[in-house]
Image: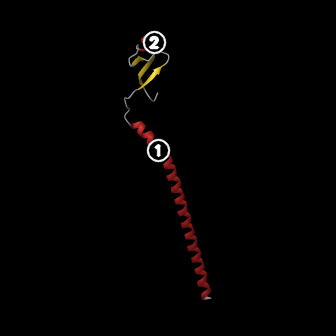
Amino acid sequence: MFLSRKTKRSRQSLQYYSNRVSWLYRNLVFVIIFCVVISTCLYAIYPLLLTFITDKFSPSSNSSYPTSIPWLTNKTECEHNPGRVWRDSHCWDYEHDPSF
C-alpha cells in the first residue's frame, strides 16, 4: 500500500512537470514567432518611415530645375515674369519646384 501511494504521487508530479514543460515550450515558440513577425514588419516599415522623417525634417534645398512652359509662345510673354528665360524657341522657368 505504501508503494502504490508513492507511485501515484510520482505519476502526478511527473504529469505536473510534463504539463509545465509543455507550457514552457508553447510559450517559447509563441514568443519566437511573435518576434519574427514583429521584426519582419519593422523591416518592411522602417525604410518608409525613415524616408518620411528625413524628407520632413531635412532642410529644403534651394535647387531649381528648369522646365519648359508650353503655353508661352513668344519672348515677351516669357520674360514678363522674373526667373523665366527664352531659349531655343521655348520659355524656360528656372524656379520650378520638383515637388510640384
Q: Are marks 2 and 1 in contact (CB under 8 Å)?
A: no
Q: Quadrant of residue 22?
A: bottom right
> Badge 1 is on which residue?
47
Query: Label 2: how many residues lie within 10 Å, few (<14), some (14-19) or many (20+)?
Result: few
Figure quadrant of the N terminus:
bottom right
- Between residue 21 and residue 89, name the one nearer to us: 89
The label shown at residue 1 is: none
Q: Residues within 10 Å of mark 1 (few under 14, many from 20)?
A: few
Q: Out of 51 and 3, give the one closest to the viewer.
A: 51
Up the image or down, 6 lies above or below 15; here it is below
Displayed quadrant of residue 75: top left
Q: Quadrant of residue 23?
A: bottom right
Q: Measuring 59% from the left and 77% from the top, which residue is drawn there?
A: 12
Residue annotated with mark 2: 74
- Look at label 2 and name its amino acid: Asn
Q: Is residue 21 left or right of residue 81?
A: right
The residue positioned farthest toward the front in the image shown: 88
Residue 42: x, y in percent? 49, 49
Residue 83, given in percent of the width and then of the height, sits at 38, 19
Residue flagged by tag 1: what amino acid is it?
Answer: Pro
User: Total label count?
Assistant: 2
Q: Secondary structure at mark 2?
A: loop
Find numbered disc 1 in the image and state the secondary structure of the residue it sits on: helix
> Relative to residue 82, is residue 48 depicted above or below?
below
Residue at figure coordinates x 43%, y 20% from the top left: 92
